[in-house]
Amino acid sequence: MLQIEDLYVEVAGRPLLKNVSLTVEKGETTILFGPNGAGKSALLSTIMGFSNYKITSGKIYFKGKDITEAPINERAKMGIGIMSQRPPNIAGVKLRDLLEIETHKNLLNLEEMARSIDMERFLERDINVGFSGGEIKRSELLQLSVQRPDFYLLDEPESGVDPVNMAQVGNMIRKLICNKKACTSHDPERKASLVITHTGEILDYLDADKAYILCNGTVMCSGNPNRLLKEIKTQGYDECIRCKMNLTQIQ
Amino acid sequence: MAENKSNAKDKETAERISKSLDKEAMYGGHVDLKLYHIPDESIEVKKMTDLDSIIKSSLTNVGISADGNAGGNFLMYNNKVSHRSSAQEGLEIMSVKEAREKYDWLEDYWWKLVSPEADKYTARSYMEDSDGYFIRVLPGTKITSPVQSCLMIGSEEALQTVHNIIIVEEGAELEVVTGCLTHDGVQRALHIGVSEMYVKKNGKLTFSMIHDWDESVEVRPRTGIRIEEGGLMTNNYVCLKPAKSIQTNPSAYLEGEGATAYFNTIAVAHPDSVLDMGSRVFLNASHTKTEIISRTITIGGEVISRGDIIGNAPEVYGHLECNGLVLNENGSQKAIPALEAHAMDVEMTHEAAIGRIARDQVEYLMTRGLDENEATSLIVRGFLSAGIEGIPEILKEDIDDIIKKTADAS
Ligand SMILES: Nc1ncnc2c1ncn2[C@@H]1O[C@H](COP(=O)(O)OP(=O)(O)OP(=O)(O)O)[C@@H](O)[C@H]1O
Ligand SMILES: [Mg+2]
């Protein structure tokens, strides 16, 4: 589904991502761990194609096609969907204005979709303007549920979400990724995803297949998500460095 | 020039006012009045539905429907009244000249909010004894269906001079949509519109004006508004189509406790056009309130956004907001907000921001599959519509058209 080869990325003229290689197979749920400032969001933004993130070398392939230079909307049309960590406010543009473009095309019932995630009354609000942390997540999810991508980039879906809403957000993500059917790991019917998490809460809702740890802009190790999370929780990210040795073996 | 009551006093007044026929306006570039003449052509229709189809379709561009279902209609073609009708009890619609014949008391409202000597435009309008609409709502009457008024220039190199009076009597409510436009094929013209609006105690007036001129038309509206105790005026001004120059700076005088005035402007400056637009509000009684909001875009023209709030009484509130986007390197934006207080306990604020479309907003929308033009147009449309709540659907389409043009041009 996604293949990143030896990627180098600059932000504001400063090298940020170095030598990043990772793959997400069809139907795979992939987790991305890493300390604050490691470059996780930058990696997701680069995959999506945001112009702030300049690729200086390396390649990104999606569904077998080289998308390294593709514009954002083309990537979206190919099936990549993102839940951004900090989406911008768009004053004067109602959430409905944006969503109706897609729902009209595909004859979807926007009202019903919004209701299912308690977002009905946000349809008339300006996009993200004054949304609380949890509301932003739900708004992003509503947008994704209208968009129906084949590959989900989720940036800390649980951050800012209270425990009650977490169940709703978690189940919603599960439903989207599982394509409504019951799903287990490596189910080819399942949508692929690359999910950033610090707490791992989202793992309660997804059967994750694989995890990568990103430190200082580079992939330090990969492995079983639950095992890596446990290690991070007990030993911190220092383990990264040691684990780097084993990376070549896994790949 | 029509039937002036020719007594000595009138002659004296006329002589005095004619001294202002060369007086340049404070703002806006020079307009040579000699280039324009008052045309003879006029039309007259019994019903709006009798209008020819070309005119009818032009009217829809300024939010006016000729289906005859409006609560009231007024149409002026060049300098003569073509049609007037009221479909509602308690709503009077006639030409100001007719009204002046009918009501002696109209003298108290006649050129009282706009001075004929203000500049050469007002002086000329006065000297031409201009006609225009008279719209009055009787006390306590709430007009439910909006009144449409339409000022149309039908001749090349025409000078259109108009004098309008609106009176919303005590406790009455009125909504007026005014469309100003040129007939297909008219390129050069000058429009001078003098409007005097009176909102009495607890009265409510919503006045929306939509302009649709041509690239070489010059426009000089002159507006005065008086609002009494508890009265409310909402003024919406929309100008998205090209014009050579527009200079307007309506003044509102809030004379009674708790009177309120809202001004919303959305405008697009096309290449080579100059839009000098402002609003001036005098808060002359306590607890009066105003908000002046403007959203302007330049795609190559010059925009000057003025706003003046003058607090002359205690415990007044005023807020000014000018937002401008520059979408073309040849365009310019200038925001000139001004606040003045001559009393204690006033609260007056202003915000002005000029910029470009934020890249992160465009890209965010692109992640949802919109292409760059679609994303830009959605953002620009949002930017403009934030200036006017409940913008009519037909205008949204206009805005979209303009944005498409912008995207093509840039
Ligand atoms: N547009 C930008 N301009 C300047 N610096 C940037 C920009 N985007 C990211 N950075 C910097 O790059 C580094 C990585 O940022 P990134 O957002 O990818 O971190 P992260 O791994 O997602 O961290 P967190 O867990 O805190 O979300 C940070 O030091 C950040 O300040
Ligand atoms: Mg991040």
Image: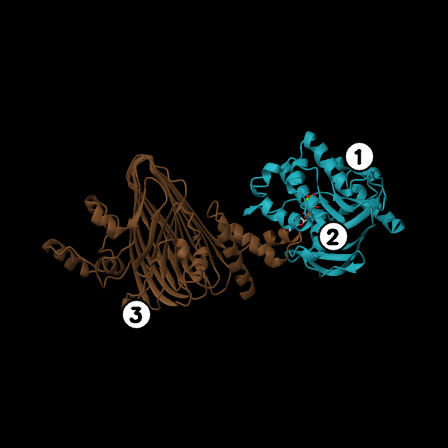
Chain colours: A cyan, B brown
In the rendered structure, which disc, 1 or 2, sits on the residue that comes first in sequence? 2
Q: Are marks 1 and 2 on the same chain?
A: yes
The span from disc 1 to disc 3 (Cα, nearest Å) is 86 Å
Q: Which residue is mark 2?
A: A79
Q: Residues within 10 Å of mark 3 (few under 14, many from 20)?
A: few
Task: Say if mark 1 contacts mark 2, CB within 8 Å.
Answer: no
Which chain letter matches label 1? A
Q: Residues within 10 Å of mark 2 (few under 14, many from 20)?
A: some
Q: Which residue is mark 1?
A: A234
Kind of residue at badge 2? Gly
- Foreground tag (3 vs 2): 3
* Residue B196 in view (yes/no): no
Which chain letter matches label 3? B
Q: Nearer the viewer, residue A198 or B387?
A: B387
For residue B408, which quarter of the picture? bottom right
Q: Note whether B368 is above or below B283 in the view shown.
A: below
Kind of residue at badge 1? Thr
The span from disc 1 to disc 2 (Cα, nearest Å) is 37 Å
x then y, percent, for residue A62:
78, 56
x then y, percent, for residue B137:
32, 41
| The N terminus of chain B sits in image quarter | bottom left
| Residue ID at (35%, 58%) | B247
**Left or right placement of residue B144 versus residue A55 in this view:** left
- Foreground tag (1 vs 2): 2
Q: Which residue is mark 3?
A: B35
Which chain letter matches label 2? A
For residue A5, which quarter of the picture? bottom right
The span from disc 3 to disc 2 (Cα, nearest Å) is 61 Å
Q: Which label number is shown at residue A149?
A: none
Q: Nearer the viewer, residue B334 or A215?
A: B334
